[in-house]
Amino acid sequence: MELLVASALGLLTAAGIYLMLRQRTFPVIVGLTLLSYAVNVFIFAAGRLVTNMPPIIDKYAAGYTDPLPQALVLTAIVISFGMTAVIVIMALGAFLEAGHDKIDMTDKDESAHPAEGTK
C-alpha cells in the first residue's frame, strides 16, 4: 500500500510540475491543481491514518486516528478551490484582453527601444 501511495504522490507531483512549466495558462492551472492534490495526499499519508478507528479518544476503542491531518486537508481543499477560482478568472481576463492564452516571457521594452550603441 505504501508503494501505491508513494507512486501516486510522485506521479501527481511530476505531472503538476510539468504542467506548471508550460507556457499556456490552462495547463498552469491544471498543474497547480495536481500539485495541491499531491500535497493533500502527502498530508494524509503523513498522518498515518488507520482504518476502523474513531477520530477521537474512546475508552472502548483499541486506538484512534489523528484528526489533525483530516482537518488540515479539509482546510487545504477549501483554500485551493478558492485559489483555483481566482486564477481561472485572472486567466480568463488575460485571455479576453490579449486574445490568446500564451504566456509571453520576452521583454517588450527591448524591441521598442533599441540599444544605444546602434544608430
Image: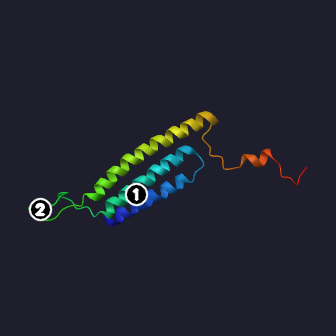
Residue found 35% across the figure and 66% down from its top: 3
Judged from the image, the secondary structure of the residue bearing numbered disc 1 is helix
Precedes in sequence: disc 2 or disc 1: 1
Residue 35, given in percent of the width and then of the height, sits at 45, 54
Judged from the image, the secondary structure of the residue bearing numbered disc 2 is loop
Indicate left or right for 60 with 48 as reference: left
Residue 2, given in percent of the width and then of the height, sits at 32, 66
Q: Are marks 2 and 1 in contact (CB under 8 Å)?
A: no
Question: On the image, numbered disc 2 is attached to which residue?
Answer: 61
Indicate left or right for 11 with 63 as reference: right
Which residue is situated farthest in the front direction here?
116
Residue found 41% across the figure and 44% down from its top: 81
Which residue is situated farthest in the left direction here?
60
Is 3 in front, or is 114?
114
The image quarter containing residue 85 is top left
Which residue is situated farthest in the right direction here?
119
The image quarter containing residue 6 is bottom left
- Residue 31 versus residue 101 in the image, above or below: below
**Quadrant of the snapshot with the N terminus:** bottom left
Residue found 32% across the figure and 62% down from its top: 45
Question: On the image, numbered disc 1 is attached to which residue?
Answer: 39
Amino acid residing under circle 2: Ala
Residue 17, given in percent of the width and then of the height, sits at 51, 56
Q: How many angstroms separate mark 2 from mark 1 (CA)?
A: 30 Å
Residue found 53% across the figure and 55% down from its top: 18
Indicate left or right for 76 with 24 as reference: left
